[in-house]
Amino acid sequence: MFSISIPPVSNRHADALRHKIDTKTKPLGALGQLEDLALKIGCIQSTLNPVLRNPTIVVFAGDHGIAAEGVSAYPQEVTFQMVLNFLAGGAAINVFSRQHGIALHVVDAGVNFDFKDHPQLIKAKIGHGTRSYLQEPAMTLDQCRQALARGSEIVDEIHQSGSNVIGFGEMGIGNTSSASILMSLLCGIELEHCIGRGTGLDSTGLKHKIQLLTQAVEHHVWDGTPLSALTVFGGFEIAMMCGAFLKAAELKMLLLVDGFIATSAVLVASKFHPHVLEYCCFSHQSDESGHQRLLEYLKAEPLLRLNMRLGEGTGAAMAYPLVQASVNFLNEMASFESAGVSDKDA
């Protein structure tokens, strides 16, 4: 597999950052999670004055063979139709990205459709969708490695353009099934507790989904490695997103993690390189069943709880203003000394 080396986040400036935060004109801890986030970003950038440059969200899209088995309320064609919607500027992620000044790229990681060239489209197709893991592995080992490497290359190019904060979203009918199985295998959580309604299954559909995914897991012999889990049960977009997370952490970017699918990708990434989690800001807790348990497993505290479950990177886009606020208060808010305000010990 491609070579990645992720250093732990340095705590060299942690004490100075904490002092700077604590001496702002406010009671200790009064800005809550924003203070923790400011400390994290300062440590990632190894500075007392962090800067956010060229925020970017990348939406990885791919089709899943398991979708043909009826695990989603929507047909597979919705994947390519939504990619076209992204490129036309009409999806929720387009609206939120424009609102917050975030650059948006869409990656064809493995959609069962051939797209025309578009300025926002990155053509990185590994295949026209994965196979159904009900019968066989979703992809070959070589395809999985290609997807990981391509995700890394995409992030490297974005970083070279000047970005130091990046969020990842996804689009792929059937991908909550892959995310649920990956979570179950890698976290050791019973599969039924990882599976949710996805795009809106009713109770009958949810029962069918649980039965199918249980059957799929029992059909395969997993060797216990993250690469094997990703190869057998993943999606091209999930694998590519995993490689993207790893590269972004190696480049010491701030990673904005979206919902359930993106969190499952960073879970896999963390099994390759645990330090990747130190660079992550978990944007929100999805309404998708299983995401809360996954966040708890990762010991991650999300910034938002809005009962969203759309994907596309929408949670990352909605959380970005809070990321900006944490950096802005750290850099711009007066201290007790500079403002001539008496603190509680005066």
Image (spheres, grey):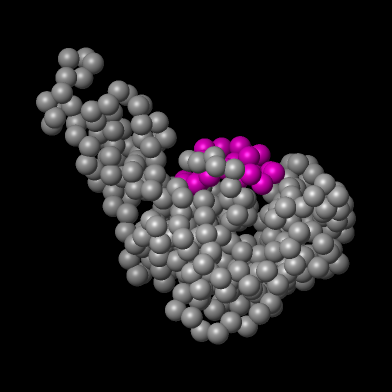
Q: So how many labels did they put on this image?
A: 0
- The relative height of residue 188 versus residue 261 in the rendered view (above or below) is above
Q: Position of residue 300 (x, y in %)?
A: 54, 40
Who is closer to the viewer here, 207 or 7? 207
- The relative height of residue 15 versus residue 271 in the rendered view (above or below) is above
Which residue is depicted at the point 44% across and 79% down? 119
Q: Is residue 205 left or right of residue 57?
A: right
Residue range corresponding to the magenta coloring: 278-302
Q: Seen from this angle, which residue lies furthest bottom? A: 116
Would residue 90 be visible to someone looking at this image? yes
Q: Position of residue 215 (x, y in %)?
A: 88, 55
Q: Is residue 4 left or right of residue 326?
A: right
Q: Position of residue 326 (x, y in %)?
A: 34, 42
Would residue 250 be visible to someone looking at this image? no
Q: Is residue 221 left or right of residue 22?
A: right
Name the image quarter holding residue 149.
bottom right
- The relative height of residue 36 versus residue 273 in the rendered view (above or below) is above
* Residue 296 belongs to the span the image colors magenta: yes
| The C terminus - image quarter | top left
